[in-house]
Image (spheres, helix red, strand yellow):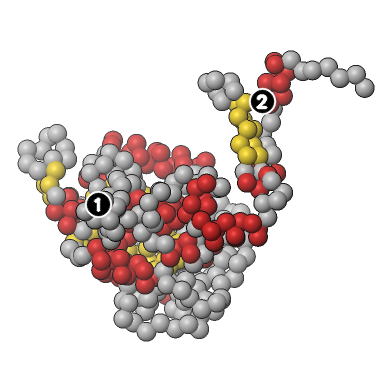
């Protein structure tokens, strides 16, 4: 067969027709840079047939999971500094701690709030009835948002603030959240619908004052802004070490087949990245060659601080825990129902069950209420 070399135009036309993940399963991917028009080939380590699972395990044992993820899996979200919670990776990482949470349990929903200057942060969670296990449901960390707008959108996400009362600054973020949900880049919003009692925890930064609106002549405390809207904050000033002790307690080893003490929904992406190595110790210096405090990185710290404020008040590390829970079922994640019910809200059952009977699921699954820590992946 006579072979003629393709022209540059023919090669570009062919490459444009390839899907974005072309060859990904075989360990390589091709794309065309939109500016330079260069064809870029990305190779993964498993493109080499000699890079087997045994090789990967040997490399992890040699250089550590964090360095392996950066150098071989191209996970650049991980810092070159030492992770603050190495237990997360060494005890299984996402495979151990992350499961789709498709139903709410009995009791309160807890908010962990951090009011960073540029990145305020919100973590929504529940605990089991014995306060020994924490379920992280959702996270949100916008950028450059006033305390008033952050309050309005956060409470809208929690199902507590009507959308028609959100001011222009907050509405921009509401539209972004809805757009992300429609594209599958974020969870359905608002997260909850009439969720019951919500308890809000934060740190001393809630006492910071700020002039939120141009028409105001005096500054207000962030806590006063929330309280004026009917959402009082519980402000706690606790040593970082106390919150760290609680988090390490939640990340401890569990018996084979048992439920982890910290269960994280897949939508909590930044928290997962933080636990996976993004949240690190401070950089060593000559004066302090072995720092024992977390780095102020301006990103991962905010959600971690909000989580720490909340977990240190919710989790009772002195409580007796049971190692006899039913093992997790690792089926496929639950899918929304086919009928027209909005899958973007958790709500109480529409037949008026009493409050102590728990919450209905957004997927209409039976509600166990976590009374016995029954937690499974949806079938």
Q: Residue furthest left?
A: 217
Give the residue at mark 1.
Answer: 286
Left or right: residue 27 versus residue 259 is right
Residue 226 is situated, as x and y percent measured from the top left of the image, at 20, 53
How many marks are shown on the rendered structure? Answer: 2
Residue 324 visible at all: yes
Query: Could you tell me residue 219's position as x and y percent?
Result: 9, 43
Callout 2: few (<14), some (14-19), or many (20+) C-alpha neighbours within 10 Å? few
Q: Which residue is mark 2?
A: 16
10 Å neighbourhood of mark 1: few (<14), some, or many (≥20)?
few
Give the foreground label among 2 and 1.
Answer: 1
Q: Position of residue 67 (x, y in %)?
A: 48, 52
The reply, left or right, for residue 375 in relation to residue 292 is right
Place of residue 140 in the rendered image (x, y in percent of width and height, measured from the top left): 36, 49
Residue at 44%, 42% in the rendered image: 178
Q: Nearer the viewer, residue 284 or 109?
A: 284
- Asked which secondary structure carries label 1, the reply is loop
Q: Which mark is residue 152?
A: none
């Amino acid at each position: 067969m006579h072979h003629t070399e393709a022209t540059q135009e023919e090669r570009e036309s062919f490459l444009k027709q390839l899907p974005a993940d072309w060859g990904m399963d075989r360990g390589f991917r091709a794309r065309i840079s939109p500016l330079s028009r260069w064809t870029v080939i990305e190779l993964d380590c498993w493109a080499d047939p000699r890079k087997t699972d045994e090789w990967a395990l040997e490399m992890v044992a040699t250089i550590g999971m964090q360095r392996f993820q950066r150098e071989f899996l191209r996970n650049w979200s991980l810092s070159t500094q030492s992770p603050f919670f190495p237990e997360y990776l060494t005890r299984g990482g996402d495979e151990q701690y992350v499961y789709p949470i498709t139903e709410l349990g009995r009791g309160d929903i807890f908010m962990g709030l951090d009011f960073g200057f540029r990145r305020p942060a919100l973590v929504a969670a529940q605990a089991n009835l014995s306060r020994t296990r924490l379920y992280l449901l959702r996270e949100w960390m916008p950028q450059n948002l006033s305390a008033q707008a952050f309050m309005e959108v956060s409470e809208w996400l929690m199902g507590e603030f009507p959308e028609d009362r959100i001011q222009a600054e907050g509405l921009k973020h509401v539209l972004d959240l809805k757009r992300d949900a429609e594209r599958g880049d974020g969870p359905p919003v608002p997260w909850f619908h009439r969720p019951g009692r919500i308890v809000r925890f934060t740190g001393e930064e809630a006492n910071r004052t700020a002039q939120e609106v141009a028409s105001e002549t005096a500054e207000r405390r962030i806590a006063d802004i929330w309280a004026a809207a009917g959402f009082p904050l519980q402000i706690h000033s606790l040593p970082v070490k106390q919150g760290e002790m609680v988090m390490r307690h939640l990340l401890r080893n569990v018996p084979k087949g048992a439920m982890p003490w910290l269960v994280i929904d897949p939508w909590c992406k930044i928290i997962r990245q933080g636990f996976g190595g993004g949240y690190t110790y401070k950089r060593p210096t000559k004066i302090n060659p072995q720092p024992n405090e977390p780095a102020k990185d301006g990103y991962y710290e905010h959600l971690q601080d909000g989580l720490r404020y909340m977990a240190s008040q919710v989790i009772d590390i002195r409580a007796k825990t049971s190692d006899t829970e039913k093992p997790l079922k690792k089926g496929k994640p639950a899918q929304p129902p086919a009928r027209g019910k909005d899958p973007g809200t958790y709500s109480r059952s529409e037949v008026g069950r009493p409050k102590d009977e728990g919450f209905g699921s957004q997927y209409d699954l039976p509600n166990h209420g976590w009374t016995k820590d029954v937690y499974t992946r949806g079938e």
